[in-house]
Image (cartoon, helix red, strand yellow):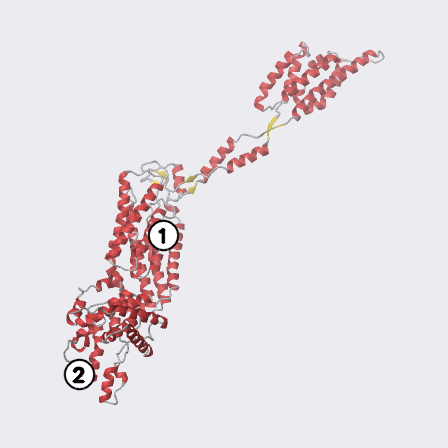
Amino acid sequence: MFRSIGKMFNSLKFKYFSILVVSLSALLLFAFMFGEVKQETYELSAFQVSPKTLRSLKTVEDAEKTEQERQRIAKEVTPVYQFSDEVAKTRQAIAGQLFDFLIQVKEAENLSVDHEDKPIISQKDRLKEIRSKLQKLEEEEPSLRLTDEALLSLLKQDVSTLRSMQKAIVGIIGGELEKPIRTTDLATIRYEVERKIRLSDAIPPGELQTMITLARSLVTETEKVNEELTEKRREQEMSAVEPTRILQGQVIVREGQFIDQEIYRQLELTGLLTNQSSTKPLIGLALFVIFVSSIIYLHFYTWNGKNNVKKKSLLIIYSIYLFLVLLMKLIGMIDKEFDVQIAFLFPTALAPMLVKLLTNERLALMVTVITAATAGIMLQEGFAAIMQMEIALYILLSGLISLYFLGKDGRRSSILRTSLGVSITNMAFIGFYLMMTQSTYNLSEWLFYFIAAVASGILSGALTIGLMPFFETAFGLLSDMRLIELSNPNHPLLKKVLTETPGTYHHSVMVANLADAACESVGAHGLLARVGSYYHDIGKTVRPGFFIENQHGGQNPHDSLPPEKSRDIIISHAVDGAKILEKNKMPQEIVDIARQHHGTSFLKYFYVKAKEMDETASEDEFRYPGPKPQTKEIAIISIADSVEAAVRSMKEPTPQKIAALVKAIINDKLNDGQFDECDLSVKELKKVETVICETLNGIFHSRIEYPE
């Protein structure tokens, strides 16, 4: 079943394969993160006791409280008063006009007395006349109405007395009304006016009460509320009121507290009741998953690599990423039971180290970023905003640092060194975080966070070392760590080569040195070439004596064999080597090196020998079965293999001889089409040629001849 699924996946084009994997992984990611963003709701009703302490999961505006506060502020706004100096003039004019009417009537009366031919005016007529004159004035100012007795009393005064009284009253009223007077001040001002009238010498004692009544009625506000300006100020003050908010994390009701109408309203407002679950967080999570999935898809879409490599890499990063999401979910569940943030124990550098060792640095950088963003959401304390930024930064910075510390190899020592560097980085970040936060931490909390920082780094290294073999086995990968293990001379197969074919072992070590240096010069995998060279001739252990490097001064068995038999023995070492490696479950890359390092090369020596015996011998019968080298590393190993054997057989090798021989071997292979199926360019072949010559010159340098 699994093989069938594997074949189906391998047969898919990368475009469809990536869409399928990304889509399935997106669904899994959404399912894992769903519980972290889904808003928890409660089945509660008003007038019951709260079963637990409930906090707001979001910041919301309490519109009702905000409006109440605005109305309170509006009521407290001080009215805008506006002073009018026209009031004093108007009131003075009214008082003056009253006395003018009285004086006019009085003068008309005096005139009738002087002219005896005119009849004397009766009191009734006098009242009627003065009333007619005062009618309009009284309509405008109803409080000005004087009694008939008061008017008749005033008319008894002579004109000069009336003028004095007029001047006094107008002066007293004008003097007081020039001041800002509000409604609340009227009683005081009227009392002051009455006091001044009583002290005035211009007013006869009998007219005091009438003048007091008149003056008090004319005293009014000179400062009145400007409704338009007051309303503007009220609106400004209301608009300046900050909205009343229920903050995220704010306690709405405590355990055992009675839920009254106000608390129930706040529970409704914050969406904590079962009938108010919101879909917005789920939509937001879906957008986040789409965003992350798009980044991963676009990364692979723009990567010009081999499809098989891309398929494996895609599966690897999703396996690591989803594993870490599950780890975050576990930590998130535990974190709620502690007063400190257990999230700081998360292995911050696990994702970048694993991905870099299993794939490449570019993918590791991408996974570091999306892991940090995911952790910010998954490892919330429950009342954070969109994400727990300190956790996201903690993982991001430590992950980036680990990529620099790890370097290019996957040795355990490098991983442990990286773990130490990550621990130091984590402690530095923890120090920054605890110093910058406004909270106060005691000594035990400081100690916990620093221990968590160190533990995070150590866990990153330990889990990386522990999980590497699992991923290598599951995905058939050959990491640098695995290569280093395979390069150990104590490996059973290398021991077999050393003990059974010591000449071949020495030859393999020399080829490894040449191939490693040449691969590094063209950007190929030098470590793979080195380790592959150690095993490339392991097939010679089947018939060690038939290969020249393992013959020690004895007779060459090929001298007594027909060329066809010799051909089969020589050619079989590549096939036998591949079988031995496969039987010992060696990585496919090493098996391919053993099988392909001779490509379809021509066994010229045995062909010529066969041709001498049989003219019908075919050249194709004396070629290795192949396939030709499929990678740069195998092509370079094939060059190094041929060159090392040829140079070792030279007498008195010089740099010139070595250079000519290396050039000839490379040209022969190039002309024979041995590099047609790998991506090794002619320019790179020149670099390989130069590096191999330099390395060989260092090996076969001239030595001082010591005297006997």
Q: Position of residue 692 (x, y in %)?
A: 29, 70
Q: Residue at x 56, y 34 (%)?
A: 231
Mark 2, mark 1: which one is toward the viewer? 2
| Residue at the disc numbered 1 | 373
Q: Residues within 10 Å of mark 1 (few under 14, many from 20)?
A: many
Q: Is residue 113 left or right of residue 198?
A: right
Which sits in the foreground, 494 or 242?
A: 494
Residue 613 placement: quadrant: bottom left
| Residue at the disc numbered 2 | 559
In this view of the protein, can residue 337 be seen by the observer? Answer: no
Query: What number of labels is visible?
Result: 2
Q: Is residue 59 left or right of residue 649?
A: right
Q: Is residue 507 above or below residue 21?
A: below
Q: Please, which residue is most extreme toward the front here?
A: 707
Q: Please, which residue is most extreme toward the left here?
A: 554
Q: Please, which residue is most extreme toward the top here?
A: 205
Q: Is residue 111 above or below residue 220?
A: above
Q: Amino acid at mark 2?
A: Asp
Q: Amino acid at mark 1?
A: Ala
Q: Are the two marked residues, 2 and 1, in contact with CB atoms closer than 8 angstroms?
A: no
Q: Position of residue 548 (x, y in %)?
A: 19, 77
Q: Residue at x 23, y 71 (%)?
A: 536
Label 2 or label 1, whichever comes before in sequence order: 1
Q: Is residue 107 left or right of residue 299?
A: right
Q: Position of residue 501 (x, y in %)?
A: 17, 72
Q: Secondary structure at mark 2?
A: helix
